[in-house]
Amino acid sequence: MALRDDLLAVGERARRASRLLARLPSPVKDAALRAMADGLEAARPELLEANRADLAAAEAAGLSRALLDRLSLSDAVVASMAQGLREVAAQPDPVGEVVRMWKRPNGLMVGKKRIPLGVIGIIYEARPNVTADAAGLCLKAGNAVILRGGSEAIASNRAIARVLGEASAAAGVPEGAIQVLGVTDREAVLELLRLEDHIDLIIPRGGEGLIRFVTDHSRIPVIKHYKGVCHVFVDASADPAMAEEIVFNAKVQRPSACNAVETLLVHRAAAPVILPRIAERLRRAGVELRGCDETRRLVPWALPATNEDWGAEYVDLILSVRVVDGLDPAIEHIERHGSLHTESIVTADYANAQRFLDEVNSSVVAVNASTRFSDGQQLGLGAEIGISTSKIHSFGPMGAEDLTTTKFVIYGQGQVRE
């Protein structure tokens, strides 16, 4: 009961704060975001020290290389967190925007006005940068946020939260707007997911197991970010040098990221020239290839792919490769094995590029660009709260606008319904 009572108090503080945040002036929110960015930079030594403690504990516990990468803070990561907050501050305030207005035959003016969602719960693993990104985006959109990070990042999250809380409070943000739970056990997550009277939306970020656990147990609407099984399709008309650079970047630049490519599809007509070239570049970078029979004929050192490889999210230097007969089989493969995250085509054929954009149903679809651009900051959102692979209420990288909804507003001159 003590845990339940504690979380109820957290929810009540967040609900009270959300009512004040909904009408907080834009200049106050933006000043708070800039102060939060300054605070992170000023506290960088403290943040890195806390993160070193988390990393030491994580290494002792045997966490995977991918999780350690996601857990790590550095000078560059802290600078990026601060820059993301400043970019969010510089964006237009989505709250209060009238997105549409029309006049009815009886003279009523009817419109849709953008409003905050209210209180958002974020449940996440590793990634201490999520603490800053989520707090900043929720503040910009006028929402209170309850953050529950994993035990592996507890010291980092607490240090970041202290900085953000002090800076935002000094700038005039109401108490309870940004709260980080210090309890990391699974029971705290279950209790949080039962606060349907206090929390309007849950956003989980982490492994597939966490996402499924949250979805199965939540009484609150959930926006899911399932695994990132991302594809690159190299078309017959692709420029070999361009294809090599895109695939290499998509796999090697940060293999632990959810937007790293996991499956390469190559048109049969291009495979004899392009595939060995790409494979050799990847081999030198330490990438393990798992390929179909045709792939292994062209790249003899590749391992045989199994059926499980086509749907795998490796988050590691592993890539599955399949040779396909054209655009239609490539799209069919993505439809069958993809996770609605991010897909890219490398092609010089305009018609094929447009078909790929129109027919591939993922949240981000690119032409002649790396899948690594599927990221809120890279797409101009300043930061992201996550990449939704659900089509409701948002799809793809989520910025401040995606943390709002709309309500109807009516302007009349005394009209009554007959």
Image (cartoon, grey):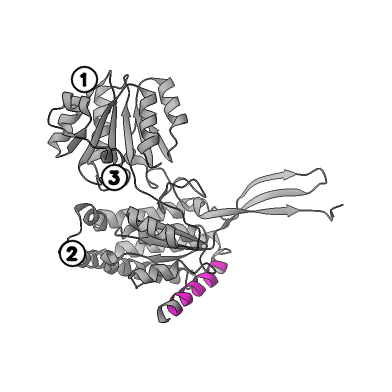
Q: Amino acid at mark 3?
A: Glu
Q: Is residue 350 left or right of residue 409?
A: left
At a point 35% along the width and 32% down the height, the residue shown is 333
Look at the magenta stretch and give its main secondary structure.
Answer: helix
Quarter of the image where the N terminus is located: bottom left
Q: Is residue 322 left or right of residue 114?
A: left
First-in-chain label (2 vs 1): 2
Task: Determine contact: label 1, label 3, CB under 8 Å.
Answer: no
Could you tell me which secondary element the residue under label 3 belongs to?
A: loop
Rendered location of residue 218, percent (x, y): 46, 62
Nearer to the camera, 381 or 259? 259
Residue holding disc 3: 313
Can residue 167 be seen here? no
Q: Is residue 2 above or below residue 341?
A: below
Residue holding disc 1: 272
Q: Is residue 21 above or below residue 115?
A: below
Rendered location of residue 134, percent (x, y): 41, 59
Name the quadrant containing residue 345: top left
Q: Residue furthest front?
A: 307
Instruction: State the extent of the magenta-drawn residues as a range.
Output: 5-19
Rendered location of residue 71, percent (x, y): 25, 58
Q: Is residue 47 magenta?
A: no
First-in-chain label (1 vs 3): 1
Residue holding disc 2: 61
Can residue 310 be seen here? yes
> How many neighbours does mark 2 have within 10 angstroms: few (below 14), some (14-19), or many (20 or more)?
few
At a point 47% along the width and 45% down the height, the residue shown is 395
Q: Amino acid at mark 2?
A: Ala
- Distance from label 1 to label 3 (Cα)? 27 Å
At a point 28% along the width and 20% down the height, the residue shown is 268
